[in-house]
Amino acid sequence: MQHTLNDIITISGVGIHTGAKTNMTLKPASVNTGIRFIRVDLEGNPIVKADVDYVFSTERSTGLKNGTAEIHTVEHILAAIVGAKIDNLIIEVDNIEIPILDGSAKEFTELIANTGVTTQNAKRKFFEVKRKITFKDEQTGTILIAEPADEYAVDVKIDYNSKTLGVQEVSMNSINEFNNHFSSSRTFCFLHELELLLDNNLIKGGDVNNAIVIVDDEISSEKLSKLEKAFGKKDIKVTEGGTLNNLTLRYKNEPARHKLLDVIGDLSLLGLPIKGKITTILEHTLLTTNYSSTNIN
């Protein structure tokens, strides 16, 4: 059966790329509504559906657009919604970008779990994979494979030719595993990408506490001082594990787990829950999606 929220949820935070402070209100919705964003700060309160037809940007994050109304960095909240098996939801926002929070879907997931969901009087419709389909993006090298399965399963492999990150693989055999094993995985980036983003003023809402920063090469004291200044923190250094000491990993393969989170969020834009297995392989390629999600991760 279809599901929606039991009650209203409110949450506020800053967007990672725009620095915009956004207030969000998640509201229950009637059957067959789907997931809809509403820009309550714009005239006419335009609706932007969480649908692939509304995707206009995948540069560093996934962005949706309807007319002049835009919503940026939607992956994490959408992944949390899928993990909760919610079909119908209204998401009111008063700015252009979804809050990054701690860089994962954890807070969204916990708020939804604490509020609870309601079973509705209508059957779910599924996007059922009937045959094996393979797609390769020749520009990035990314491979996606969809094949029939009884449940929604996702496999992810990442290999960015990084001596620090190494090759990481992770599997989710059922969407029931998402909340406990994947929702808390945070976004990541490489140090050289972080420097590029800082130089281009692309992480205005950034904080070293919402991203794992991977360091492959020796870093100079000058660069460390620059990072300390950028983030307003002292004693930034590289750990023995090759990451900045801004946080402690929640999982040894947290980057791969976060990529899986992003895959779930982005594929939710099909508009229906998936019945099938998705395999994503990201190898020896520049990261082209987001510092807060599928994207500069």
Image (cartoon, rainbow, N blue to C red):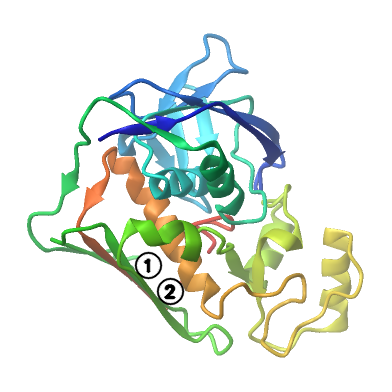
Q: Is 174 left, or right, of 198 in this rendering?
A: left
Tally of marks? 2
Circles 1, 2 touching at the beta carbon (< 8 Å): yes
First in sequence, mark 1 or 2: give its number: 1
- Name the spot of residue 185 as percent of width and height, x first: 55, 64
Estimate the x, y position of residue 137 in percent, counting from the top left.
29, 63
Residue 248: x and y in percent read 70, 74
Can residue 154 be seen at all in this image of the molecule? yes
Judging depth in this view, the residue of 92 and 226 nearest the camera is 92
Q: Is residue 287 visible?
A: no
Residue 289, position in %: x, y?
48, 57
Front position in the image: 42 or 121: 121
What is the quadrant of the N terminus in the image?
A: top left
- Furthest residue in direction right, as rendered: 234
Q: Under tag 2, what secondary structure?
A: loop
Q: Is residue 40 above or below residue 293?
A: above
Q: Is residue 148 above or below residue 161?
A: above
**Is residue 45 rendered to the left or right of residue 277?**
right
Determine the residue positioned at 53% across, 64% down: 297
Name the residue beneath numbered marker 2: 285
Mark 2 residue crowding within 10 angstroms, few (<14) / some (14–19) / many (20+): some
Q: Is residue 22 above or below residue 209?
A: above
Q: Quadrant of residue 108?
A: top right
